[in-house]
Image (cartoon, rainbow, N blue to C red):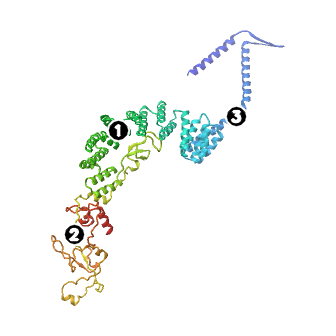
């Protein structure tokens, strides 16, 4: 709208000026040599305007002709740049979806049409990486590192290539050079910080951490936590070398990160040695409320040197009450109760966790069975169960499981990466129970405990298979007429003696008698005549096949066996073995292996 108004005003002013010139009187005369021109003022103004316009047109034509070669060169260069930018765009897209051949083709086109473009160098380097051409990628990154505008990018690429080539020294040197160029470079500070921690240069690591905080790479809370981690690592390393510096470092660390478990444990140890018991207990309690840990429970139980096992048990119960229901509290109570010979408290603490025990729960139950009752059979059953039990939490970082806390992850070099948690590989599946106990473990743990009593094997009434003499004819299925001698005396034929088999030779004979006599059943049971069969074909199908007589077992010294007279063993009844043979897992294995 404003432009239209201005345009109308200009037209009005031009019309007003033309009308004013047309109203003026007088002539204009021009004299040049022998020529004289005389005209009115309006005509002079009109001629002057035409001359000016013609001059401008001629100047434009001459200028255009003069600049034509330059314009042609510029247009050709712009077309090449456009082709190069198009090739760069398409090449980066090809790298994005993993098409190495297309990326390489577009990289060659971009290098041909836009060789000085930084993005062309980046495309060439990334296409070489995608193709697995490390030498080509390094050449491209070196070319980028020689340019001022792409030097930091080239150093980053060379750093990545050094990591892939497993050359940590070159990688750290490149990171240090990049950190000098740009102190706010996060990847360079991360790499140098990890290298300082790996070689134990805690002063250098703390300096880099201060630079990160001043450059705004980390916030204040993260800075306090990471500084506490570095101070704790230095204190742990200097604990036996420079105790004064270790104490100073860990006291500052526990102020910056009061929930850091290693810092709280070490600080509690130093305070306990200085007889500051209350302060030591407060340090452990603060960390325990955030994350219960076995090291905290151990430090809390030994906070006062020289205490008895029962006093330690009372102190551990106080600590466990601050996080009720947590498994670490129960394990700490069970450990202290076993040391104090309070076995009932230990069982009560572990009772909620024995249905699906972890490895530490199973091992504590094995120790409890061995210490309280001397029951090595149940102890071995719990130990076998611990092999397949659920894993306990451990110090884990980026999938790496460590037996101790570390300040930096050995996989990625990340600071404060280790967390007290269950490893990912040990988590149970959603498809069903992850751990299944064997039938032997279930039967052994379900067997009631009794005193050790070794009794002689009782006689067993079993069907006896009568051996047939070689001259005795094989009975047939058809009815056969009895012999005259057998018909006159109605007594059954006497058994014919035969050589005993190896199984029968190993049977213990009840007593040495002159002639074999049928075994008499116990007085408590009514007399039952033992059935006689001449061959296995005459045994009814409902009668079980004969088994050898009771074989005396040689028990191991640590095998409890059967304890006392009582209700029959459930596991022995399931497998059909007399109670006298049911005790001990060695007897179980020998019976199944022998039968």
What crowding class fits label 3: few (fewer than 14 Cα within 10 Å), some (14-19), or many (20 or more)?
few
Q: Separation of disc 2 and disc 3 at Cα?
A: 116 Å
In the rendering, which numbered label is found on residue 269?
Answer: 1
**Residues at circles 1 and 2 in contact by the CB criterion of under 8 Å:** no
Left or right side of 201 for 21? right
Query: Looking at this rendering, what residue extends furthest in the top direction?
Result: 26
Q: How many numbered circles does the render carry?
A: 3
Sequence-wise first label, 2 or 3: 3
| Local secondary structure at mark 3 | helix
In the rendered structure, find residue 73 and report the number of the disc placed on it.
3
Q: Quadrant of residue 470?
A: bottom left
Q: Which residue is mark 2?
A: 458
Q: Is residue 420 left or right of residue 203?
A: left
Mark 2 closeness class: few <14, some 14–19, many ≥20 residues within 10 Å: few
The residue lying at 63 percent from left, 15 percent from top is 13
Q: Position of residue 587 (x, y in %)?
A: 29, 64
Q: Nearer the viewer, residue 229 or 165?
A: 229
Residue 67, relative to residue 7: is it above or below? below
Tell me the crowding category of disc 1: few under 14, some 14 to 19, or many 20 or more residues within 10 angstroms, Cα based.
Answer: many
Kindly indicate the quadrant of the structure image that contains residue 229: top left
**Mark 3 and mark 1: Cα distance apart in space:** 80 Å
Disc 2 vs disc 3: Cβ atoms closer than 8 Å? no
């Amino acid at each position: 709208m404003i432009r239209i108004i201005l345009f109308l005003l200009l037209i009005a002013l031009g019309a007003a000026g033309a009308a004013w010139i047309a109203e003026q009187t007088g002539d204009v005369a021009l004299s040049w040599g022998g020529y004289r021109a005389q005209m009115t003022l309006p005509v002079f103004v009109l001629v002057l305007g035409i001359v000016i316009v013609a001059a401008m047109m001629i100047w434009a034509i001459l200028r255009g002709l003069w600049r034509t070669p330059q314009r042609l060169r510029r247009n050709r260069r712009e077309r090449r740049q456009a082709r190069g930018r198009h090739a760069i765009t398409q090449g980066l897209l090809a790298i994005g979806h993993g098409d190495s051949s297309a990326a390489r083709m577009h990289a060659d086109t971009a290098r041909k049409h836009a060789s000085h473009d930084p993005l062309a160098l980046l495309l060439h380097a990334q296409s070489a990486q995608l193709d697995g051409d490390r030498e080509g990628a390094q050449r491209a990154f070196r070319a980028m590192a020689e340019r001022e505008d792409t030097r930091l990018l080239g150093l980053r690429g060379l750093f990545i290539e050094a990591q892939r080539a497993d050359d940590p020294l070159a990688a750290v040197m490149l990171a240090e050079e990049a950190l000098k160029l740009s102190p706010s470079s996060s990847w360079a500070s991360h790499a140098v910080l990890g290298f300082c921690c790996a070689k134990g240069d805690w002063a250098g690591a703390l300096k880099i951490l201060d630079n990160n905080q001043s450059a705004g790479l980390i916030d204040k809370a993260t800075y306090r936590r990471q500084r506490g981690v570095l101070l704790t690592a230095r204190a742990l390393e200097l604990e036996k070398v420079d105790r004064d510096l270790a104490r100073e470092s860990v006291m500052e660390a526990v102020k910056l990160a009061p929930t850091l478990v290693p810092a709280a444990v070490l600080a509690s140890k130093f305070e306990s040695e200085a007889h500051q018991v209350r302060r030591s207990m407060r340090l452990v309690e603060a960390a325990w409320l955030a994350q219960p840990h076995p090291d905290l429970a151990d430090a809390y139980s030994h906070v006062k040197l020289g205490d008895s096992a029962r006093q330690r048990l009372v102190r551990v119960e106080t600590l466990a009450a601050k996080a009720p229901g947590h498994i670490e509290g129960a394990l700490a109570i069970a450990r202290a109760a076993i040391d104090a010979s309070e076995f009932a408290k230990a069982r009560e603490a572990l009772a909620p966790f024995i249905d699906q025990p972890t490895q530490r729960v199973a091992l504590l139950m094995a120790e409890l069975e061995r210490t309280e009752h001397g029951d090595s059979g149940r102890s071995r059953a719990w130990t076998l169960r611990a092999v397949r039990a659920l894993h306990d939490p451990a110090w884990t970082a980026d999938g790496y499981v460590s037996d101790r806390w570390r300040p930096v992850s050995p996989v990625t070099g990340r600071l404060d990466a280790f967390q007290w948690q269950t490893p990912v590989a040990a988590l149970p599946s959603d498809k069903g129970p992850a751990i299944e106990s064997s039938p032997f473990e279930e039967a052994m743990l379900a067997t009631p405990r009794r005193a050790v009593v070794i009794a002689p094997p009782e006689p067993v009434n079993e069907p006896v298979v009568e051996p047939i003499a070689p001259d005795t004819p094989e009975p047939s299925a058809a009815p056969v007429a009895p012999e005259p001698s057998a018909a006159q005396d109605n007594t059954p034929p006497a058994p014919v003696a035969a050589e005993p088999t190896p199984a029968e030779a190993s049977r213990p004979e009840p007593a040495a008698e002159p002639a074999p006599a049928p075994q008499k059943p116990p007085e408590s049971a009514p007399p039952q005549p033992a059935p006689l069969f001449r061959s296995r074909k005459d045994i009814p199908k409902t009668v079980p096949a004969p088994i050898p007589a009771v074989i005396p077992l040689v028990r191991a010294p640590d095998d409890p066996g059967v304890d006392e007279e009582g209700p029959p063993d459930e596991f022995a009844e399931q497998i059909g073995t007399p109670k006298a043979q049911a005790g001990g897992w060695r007897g179980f294995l020998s019976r199944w292996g022998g039968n």
